[in-house]
Amino acid sequence: MAGALVGLVGGGFRWCLVHADQLRGSVLEAAAGLGAAGRLIPVVLTAVGAAAACAIAQRVPHAAGSGIQHVEAVWRHEAEARTAWLLPAKFLGGLIAIGSGLVLGREGPIVHMGAAIGSAAGRRGRLDAADSVDSVDAEDSGDAEDAQGAQGAEDLRMLHIALGGAGLAVAFTAPLGGLLFVCEEVTGTVRPRLVLLTLVGTVTAVACSQLLVGDALVLPLSDAPAPPLWMLPVFLLSGMTAGALGAAYSALVVRTLEVCDRLTRVPLVARAAVIGAGVGALMAFDPLLTGGGDQLSERLLTGGSLTVAALVLCLAVRFVAGPLSYAAATPGGLFAPLLALGALWGTLTHALASPLLPAGSAGAAAFAVVGMAAVFTGVVRAPLTGAVLVVEMTGSGALLLPLLIACFAAAVTADRLGGEPVYDALRRRMLERA
């Protein structure tokens, strides 16, 4: 039942975002017909949206940002699960922030909402009832009730985590990706009980979400056959560069938050409005520079051509705009912008390397897919999750070997560079500020 609710809530969130993107596109088209004055419309639109979303998030603890770091902290006994008002704040605030064009992803809010639904379901099912026995009664009743209380608390946390993984599965229509996310990134362990809970949650949630968003691939890939084996070293090198890019991006996210923290005289809502205005100015220049990045990724995966100069410009702008958008303290995630950044990096790598490659080598779409998974791995440090998530999103099973070797190289490179996984850094920062 909880998985079905996650699917309906997450699917509804995705459905609303699709229509918000369509509405934003219509506004941009109308603004383009107004000449120079029309360029102010996206600036005002995004500034107001960022400020409103920030104001909503500030009223609910842990509603700002991705929320994945909070889910991980709950698993590690470092924070308490929160349900009251978190779900509406994440839904409405995330819809306004992402819908207005900030460079944020939908997966963070859906994961956090899924985890909140899991905690609420556990409490409704009285999984924590045994944990509320006071110390005197527990001493009288012996070890049996102590064990029952511990098991109740453990089951409650497992439901919290499992339904968070279901949220990720709904965000990208990737049930296996949701399972691996729970085991590899959130918990770092594989337990049969946790795996079964997560499988039930992800399958149910994805099935219910498809009633609202359909069952099509999130990022359909044009024909990309398996590359020849001799190209695996090429993808290894590509993964190394993507890992370095991911480590730099992770560091920039944290550094941008630290710099914004020093602006103590600027109210958070005003700061969000300024950041939103800057993103809106980029949107007026080219909408592909802003937003979650699905349209950009789909264009690169389906053969849409961009010049090398356009790829470099888009990569540089989105590399900075993503951390800035996250610093606006609105609900929103990091995954989707990361995937777009990886698609840009992979396509650019192919454009630069293609003159050196012989005939019959992999095309730009294959490099874009590999870049998506490798940059994700460099930032999050979850190679299996990155590879499987991208395969489920794009249907690129033929590219599994290049994906795995590139993700391996990205993870090792990012570790060797001393970069901290982004959610570890964000969780530590959250706990220090608590």
Image (spheres, rainbow, N blue to C red):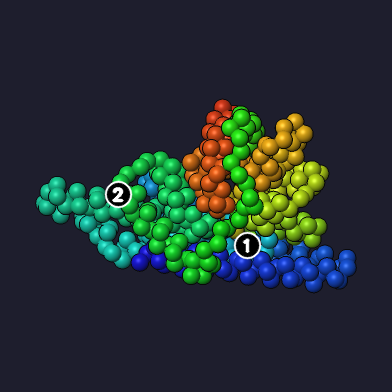
State the image coordinates of residue 320 (x, y, percent, origin top left).
70, 46
Crowd rating for badge 2 (residues with CA inside 10 Å; few <14, some 14–19, many 20+): few
Crowd rating for badge 1 (residues with CA inside 10 Å; few <14, some 14–19, many 20+): many
**What residue sits 14% from the left and 47% below the top?**
143
User: Which is nearer the eye, 347 or 253?
Assistant: 347
Quarter of the rendering containing residue 252: top right
For mark 2, what is the residue?
193
**What residue sits 63% from the left and 50% below the top?**
223
399 relative position to 142: left or right: right
State the image coordinates of residue 362 (x, y, percent, origin top left).
66, 39
User: Which is nearer the eye, 211 or 324?
Assistant: 211
**What residue sits 77% from the left and 67% below the top?**
28
What is the CA distance from the residue labelled 1 to the residue labelled 2?
36 Å
Residue 129 to residue 426: above or below: below
Residue 51 badge: none
Name the amino acid type tagged 1.
Answer: Ala
State the image coordinates of residue 359 (x, y, percent, origin top left).
72, 35
From this viewpoint, which residue is outermost toward the top?
416
Q: Quadrant of the N terminus?
A: bottom left
**What residue sits 62% from the left and 52% below the top?**
221
Residue 97 badge: 1
Name the amino acid type tagged 2.
Answer: Arg
Of the numbered discs 1 and 2, the one sitting upstream in the chain is 1
Residue 34 to residue 197: above or below: below
Q: Secondary structure at mark 2?
A: helix
